Image: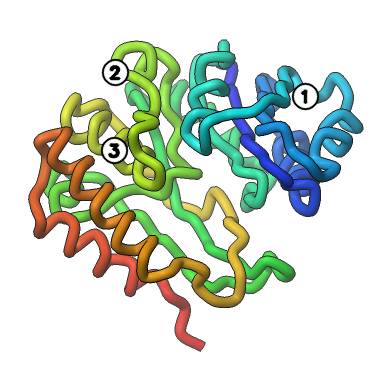
Amino acid sequence: MKISIITIAYNSGHSIADAINSVLSQTYTDIEYIIVDGKSKDNTVEVVKSFGDRISKFVSEPDKGIYDALNKGVRMATGDVIGFMHSDDLFASDTILEKVAEIFKNHDTDSLYGDLQYVYKNDTNKVLRYWKSGKFTIGRLRRGWMPPHPTFYVKKKIYDQHGVFNTDFRIAADYDTMLRFLGKYRITTHYLPEVMVKMRVGGASNRSLKNIIKKSKEDMKAIHDNEFGSVLTLVLKNLRKLTQFIVK
């Protein structure tokens, strides 16, 4: 089973080497690694090229935003399963993809997901938030639950059948995709109960009130477009984030 991992980048020279090494250090070897760069102005391209042919496919060209770049990667992918490793992220261990492959081989599932830790930018061992997903049910999805997108692995045929990211969304296309796949089309999924990915964040939230309002509007549009959920879904989705913070 070939797993396609897609990393998108823009001016990510400060962190992308860690992300790349995290992918290349996986014990599972049947990996197609695709990097899509948005024509960075820093040293991102030089860093990527320093890994030579260990990167399966690399393109650096202007794009129309995050989801346009992700779609380029999905369309370039030839693996049986597609997952994402963002340029600031890391796998929690070097056996994650081995476990992903094992689940897809041994279970009749269209997708899988796991847990995610938000870690501090300069210390990836220091956890700020812990997104413990828990098992999926359609009722939980309707009550605002969603899996962390960086842990969401999906068979390529699902993207072929049900579409890629909707670039009409600027912030919430990942939520729209999950509602479309899990809620509207009811694809099957499987929970891997461990931390799969560490996501770097700053020490404090960098999301303005304006962006929070914009994100909520887009989330509501995704709920409406997929005819799945209600205003209560959105309210509960936002409240769930409060349980992720680590109290020191």
**Residue 162: mark:** 2
* Mark 1 surroundings within 10 Å by alpha-carbon count, few (fewer than 14), some (14 through 19), many (20 or more): some
Residue at which label 3 appears:
176
Q: Which mark is nearer the camera, 1 or 3?
A: 3
Task: Point out residue 239 in the picture as x, y percentages from the top left corner.
Answer: 25, 69
- Which is nearer the eye, 56 or 135? 56
**Residue 55: mark:** 1
Q: Is residue 58 left or right of residue 187?
A: right
In the image, residue 241 above or below residue 76: below
Kindly identify the residue that appears in the image at 41 percent across and 49 percent down.
Answer: 148
Task: Point out residue 166 in the picture as x, y percentages from the top left corner.
Answer: 35, 29
Q: Work out whether mark 2 precedes mark 1 in sequence or the reverse, and give the earlier one.
A: 1
Kindly identify the residue that appears in the image at 40 percent across and 47 percent down.
Answer: 171
The amino acid on which the numbered mark 2 sits, given as a three-letter code, is His
Q: Work out whether mark 3 precedes mark 2 in sequence or the reverse, and give the earlier one.
A: 2
The amino acid on which the numbered mark 3 sits, given as a three-letter code, is Asp
Residues under labels 2 and 1: Cα distance?
28 Å
Residue sitting at the far bottom? 248
In the image, residue 59 above or below residue 136: above
Residues under labels 3 and 2: Cα distance?
12 Å
Residue 6 image-quadrant placement: top right
Q: Is residue 6 left or right of residue 144?
A: right
Q: Work out whether mark 1 precedes mark 3 in sequence or the reverse, and give the earlier one.
A: 1
Residue 210 image-quadrant placement: bottom left
Give the structural element (helix, strand or loop) at label 2. Answer: helix
The amino acid on which the numbered mark 1 sits, given as a three-letter code, is Ile
